[in-house]
Amino acid sequence: MSIDLAGLSPQQLDELIAKAGEAKRNLHKQRINDVRKQILQIAKDQGYTIDELFGSGKRSGSKSASGAKFANPADQSQTWTGRGKRPGWFKAALASGASADSLLVG
């Protein structure tokens, strides 16, 4: 297919570009759908479902929040899980000679 681009106005070129982009996106979507159908058929032919092969795609449960592992001896309401950046009170306690084990909760 050959299109004489030299004879087109800037507006016509913009329209052509927009149509070509849409055609490309539609082709991509169609190819994805075709591959999905092929994969589903292969799984079905072998006696499986996609969920059996790859899981449902949903996470089971949610990421549980970690409980407090360390507490500030001067203010028990200030706690830290031991993950992420060390809080200022934790660093200050270590600098003053406390051990991490002495800051453990319970």
Image: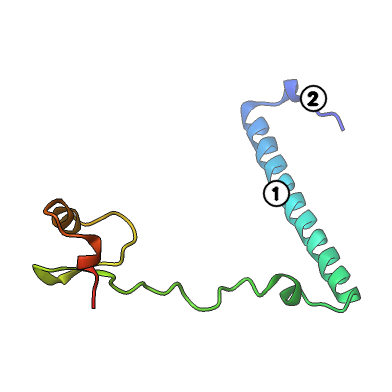
How many numbered marks does the figure carry?
2
Q: Residues under labels 2 and 1: Cα distance?
A: 23 Å
- Quadrant containing the C terminus is bottom left
Residue drawn at x 21%, y 60% is 99
Quarter of the image where one finds residue 8: top right
Work out whether residue 56 or residue 67 is closer to the camera in this orientation and state it: 67
Residue 79: image x %, image y %? 21, 68
Q: Secondary structure at mark 2?
A: loop
- Amino acid marked by disc 1: Arg
In the shown orientation, is residue 76 left or right of residue 2?
A: left
Query: Which mark is on residue 35?
Result: none
Which residue in the protein does label 2 denote?
4
In the shown orientation, is residue 34 left or right of residue 26?
A: right
Residue 33: image x %, image y %? 77, 61
Tag 2 near tag 1, CB within 8 Å: no
Of the image marks 2 and 1, the number of the one nearer the N terminus: 2
Which residue in the protein does label 1 denote?
25
Quarter of the image where one finds residue 38: bottom right
Residue drawn at x 87%, y 79% is 47
Residue 9: image x %, image y %? 66, 26
- Amino acid marked by disc 2: Asp
Q: Secondary structure at mark 1?
A: helix
- Quadrant containing the N terminus is top right
Residue drawn at x 67%, y 31% is 13
Quarter of the image where one finds residue 97: bottom left
Colouring scheme applied when the structure was drawn: rainbow
Residue 62: image x %, image y %? 47, 75
Work out whether residue 89 or residue 36 is closer to the camera in this orientation and state it: 89
